Image (spheres, helix red, strand yellow):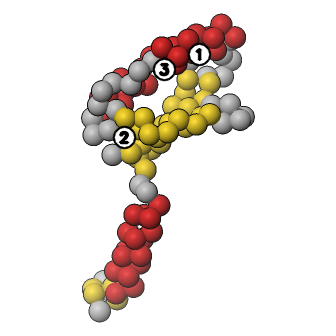
């Protein structure tokens, strides 16, 4: 399953804490059950990681070293082509429902 892990420095983070975050990131390796597909840093600060895993504990382990320095927002994501196909199917189904029953 794919996850978008958005992250932002904690408010008030000191320069020493920022340096520590960089040190941790340079030494960090994800658990074997987590594949990092992409990692982008926002020009304005923070960033987003696209991770693939079926093991949620691995996702937790991936973020744990940074939890005191970074705020996370984690969302499961679906490929846009898959999402469009699902949306079309749902729209077709919803249009077929009349007065609580299928037409």
- State which tag comes first along the sequence, 2 or 1: 1
- State which tag comes first along the sequence, 1 or 3: 1
On the rendered structure, is 100 left or right of 95?
Answer: left
- Quarter-of-image position of residue 102: bottom left
**Front label number (1 vs 3):** 1
Q: Position of residue 28 (x, y in %)?
A: 45, 18
- State which tag comes first along the sequence, 2 or 3: 2
Q: Which mark is residue 100?
A: none
99, 3: nearer the viewer: 3
Is residue 74 shown to the viewer in this render? no
Q: Position of residue 66 (x, y in %)?
A: 49, 19
- Quarter-of-image position of residue 92: bottom left
Label 2 crowd (10 A; few <14 / some 14-19 / many >=20): some
* Farthest right residue in view: 44
Label 3 crowd (10 A; few <14 / some 14-19 / many >=20): some
33, 44: nearer the viewer: 33
Q: Are marks 1 and 3 in contact (CB under 8 Å)?
A: no
Q: Residue at x 66, y 22 (%)?
A: 11
**Front label number (2 vs 3):** 2
Q: Which mark is residue 67?
A: 3
Q: Residue at x 52, y 18 (%)?
A: 25
Q: Residue at x 30, y 34 (%)?
A: 56
């Amino acid at each position: 399953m794919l996850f978008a892990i958005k992250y932002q420095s904690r408010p008030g983070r000191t320069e020493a804490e920022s340096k520590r975050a960089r040190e941790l990131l340079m030494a960090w390796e994800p658990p074997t059950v987590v594949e990092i597909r992409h990692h982008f840093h926002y020009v304005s600060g923070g960033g987003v990681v696209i991770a693939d895993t079926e093991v949620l504990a691995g996702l937790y382990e991936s973020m744990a070293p940074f939890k005191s320095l970074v705020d996370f927002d984690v969302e499961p994501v679906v490929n846009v082509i898959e999402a469009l196909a699902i949306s079309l199917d749902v729209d077709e189904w919803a249009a077929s429902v009349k007065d609580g029953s299928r037409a």
